[in-house]
Image: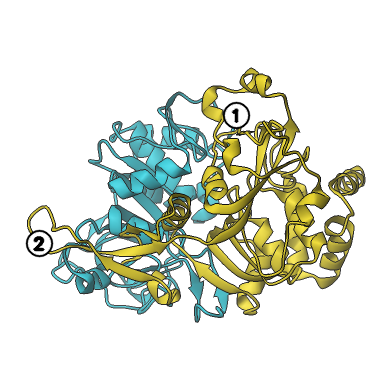
Chain colours: A yellow, B cyan
């Protein structure tokens, strides 16, 4: 089994401007934030982010690296609407491609299964189709059970993702990932849907230790879908990563406040986002907490 | 009797008669009302703990440490599967709602560059086209009960008439509960009708706070008040009185 453990710098060398990047997690939950900051440090621009959106969409729009967001929602959970995303939408600085939450899942699934689309009823009658002029409907080739003509459905296109990033509780050096929290979300699909996938984790452990902390049901990321593993303890901070840690609500609140105040944003950006490494970031967070 | 308690009971009544479905209320008063319905007259519905499991006991709001009797596991992916299966009755909020039940929680103004970005479409398009939906509007006003919504996140009856069969066959906007009354669409054109008015509310107050013409039946009922047992259960679910902040007297 090949050793796929890499450094953040190795990860940065994989990035290019104009890429479409899939981001695992859900809202402000188990987001690969250390890798999001690596993207910020890399300076790549014109990015498209595909995600069940959380702070990655807000932060990358605030750093002006985001061109387009493809999402089911963009939320910080305890703060229902991502504040930097709100600013970006209301000032029209990013292109937004919005899907019904469930329909978004089908875009990931179609990409994972290498089919051009999956059909769904979601979107019929609502403004989802009007908001997204690229969306098409399709007529079922099969008659209705009662003999009527085929039903018209929305064809959710497969997301074309260059690179996905996900964060797991545990991983082995070969690239197998383990989630120990309440929900995998759609991280396995992000890994499958993308051409390449990079996985950060709280801890790299020997393969034979996986079952010490969770049942076989927690081993949902097989290494065949993973290209690199980056060990990053507290790598999802300030989002939650249960059971290792819950959301840092105080820090998230502080982050949220930077959307309304340019000076606060500049300080936040300088101190936390431009930190030279994940370790420096954690040290900055630690010193902020000491000051509370 | 507090208005918030009457609203919670009215919300619970939206789920009366439901059996083997996921009762999925979203928001403070809806969750209290849904859990109340399950704890009393609709014991056969299943409900989530708002994280990832179905719990059989009435859980207090926002208490991650509350003891729960887990009966099944429903991560988000399973929730979507249940949506598409149709075995679900959701209650959502609506920043704007119109006479045919079109809901907007997406944005105010033009979608391309909105005046105010709201929550977004969220799961509304999929919910409405797949299963029964009710709405909760804690602040009934001409700004929330509008003649036309800016963006249709959840389609109403006029949109469904235009879509036609078979696509519209699972659409079912069941009730709208506001701080002033309970409304349904049981009219020939599926226009919104007053079903009941909460005790202490005048008909004129409802009419003045609605931007469109409501269908008014010849006799308008008063919304029922919750009984002692229901009030006791509400206290268990909402011990800190969050419902009173959502619906002030």
Secondary structure of residue under mark 2: loop
Determine which of the numbered discs, if any, sits on residue B222 in the image: none
Residue beneath label 1, please?
B65
Dot 2 alpha-carbon crowd within 10 angstroms: few under 14, some 14 to 19, many 20 or more: few
Q: Where is residue B244 in the image (x, y as percent from the top left)?
A: 52, 50
Q: Which residue is drawn at 32% across and 58% down?
A: A120
Q: Examine the image and state in which quarter residue A95 appears.
A: bottom right
| Picture residue at 39% right of the left edge, 51% below the top | B7
**Is B147 in front, or is A113?**
A113
Q: Which residue shows up at 68% across the image and 72% down it?
A: A46
Horizontal side, residue A254 vs residue B82: left or right = right
Q: Which of B61 and A18 is in front in this view?
A: A18
Q: How far apart are marks 2 and 1 (CA)?
A: 52 Å
Q: Callout 1: residue from which chain?
A: B
Q: Which of marks 2 and 1 is in front?
A: 2
Q: Residues within 10 Å of mark 1 (few under 14, many from 20)?
A: few
The numbered disc on residue A148 is: 2
- The residue lying at 41 percent from left, 57 percent from top is A103
Badge 1 element: loop
Q: Residue A53 at x, y = what percent?
A: 59, 57
For this rendering, which residue is in front, A277 or A122?
Answer: A277
Identify which residue, B90 or A29, lies in the foreground.
A29
Residue reaching furthest left?
Answer: A147
């Amino acid at each position: 089994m090949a050793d796929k453990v890499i450094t953040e710098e190795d990860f940065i060398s994989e990035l290019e401007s104009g890429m479409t990047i899939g981001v695992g997690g859900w809202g402000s939950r188990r987001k690969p934030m250390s890798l999001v900051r690596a993207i910020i440090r890399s300076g790549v621009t014109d990015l498209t982010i595909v995600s069940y959106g959380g702070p990655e969409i807000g932060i990358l729009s605030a750093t002006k690296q985001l061109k387009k967001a493809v999402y089911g929602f963009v939320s910080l959970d305890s703060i229902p609407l991502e504040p930097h995303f709100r600013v970006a939408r209301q000032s029209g600085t990013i292109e937004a491609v919005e899907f019904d939450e469930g329909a978004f899942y089908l875009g990931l699934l179609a990409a994972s299964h290498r089919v051009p689309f999956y059909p769904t009823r979601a979107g019929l009658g609502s403004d989802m189709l009007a908001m997204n002029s690229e969306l098409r409907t399709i007529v079922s080739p099969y008659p209705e059970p009662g003999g009527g003509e085929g039903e018209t459905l929305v064809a959710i296109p497969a997301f074309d993702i260059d690179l996905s990033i996900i964060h797991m509780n545990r991983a082995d050096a070969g690239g197998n990932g383990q989630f120990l929290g309440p929900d995998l979300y759609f991280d396995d699909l992000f890994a499958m849907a993308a051409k390449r996938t990079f996985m950060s984790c709280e801890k790299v452990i020997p393969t034979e230790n996986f079952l010490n902390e969770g049942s076989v049901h927690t081993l949902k990321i097989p290494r065949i879908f993973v290209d690199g593993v980056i060990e990053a303890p507290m790598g999802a901070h300030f989002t939650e990563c249960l059971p290792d840690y819950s959301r840092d609500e105080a820090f998230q609140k502080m982050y949220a406040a930077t959307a309304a105040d340019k000076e606060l944003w500049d300080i936040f950006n300088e101190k936390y986002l431009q930190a030279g490494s994940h370790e420096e970031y954690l040290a900055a967070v630690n010193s902020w907490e000491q000051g509370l | 009797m507090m208005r918030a308690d009457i609203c919670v009971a009215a919300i619970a009544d939206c789920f009366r008669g439901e059996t083997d479905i996921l009762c999925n209320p979203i928001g403070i008063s809806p969750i209290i009302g849904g859990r109340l319905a399950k704890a009393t007259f609709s014991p056969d519905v299943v409900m989530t703990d708002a994280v990832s499991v179905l719990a059989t006991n009435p859980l207090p709001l926002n208490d991650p440490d509350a003891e729960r009797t887990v009966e099944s596991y429903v991560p988000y992916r399973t929730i979507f599967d249940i949506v598409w299966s149709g075995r679900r009755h959701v209650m959502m909020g609506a920043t704007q709602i119109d006479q045919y039940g079109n809901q907007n929680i997406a944005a105010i103004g033009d979608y391309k560059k909105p005046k105010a970005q709201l929550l977004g479409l969220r799961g509304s398009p999929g919910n409405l086209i797949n299963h029964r939906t009710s709405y909760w509007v804690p602040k009934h006003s001409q700004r929330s009960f509008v003649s036309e919504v800016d963006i249709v996140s959840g389609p109403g009856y006029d949109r469904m008439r235009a879509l036609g069969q078979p696509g519209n066959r699972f659409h079912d906007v069941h009730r709208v509960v506001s701080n002033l009354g309970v409304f349904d669409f049981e009219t020939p054109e599926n226009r919104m009708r007053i079903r009941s008015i909460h005790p202490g509310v005048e008909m004129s107050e409802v009419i003045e706070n609605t931007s469109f013409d409501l269908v008014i039946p010849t006799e308008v009922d008063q919304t029922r008040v919750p009984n002692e047992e229901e009030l006791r259960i509400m206290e268990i679910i909402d011990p800190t009185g969050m419902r009173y902040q959502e619906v002030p007297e």
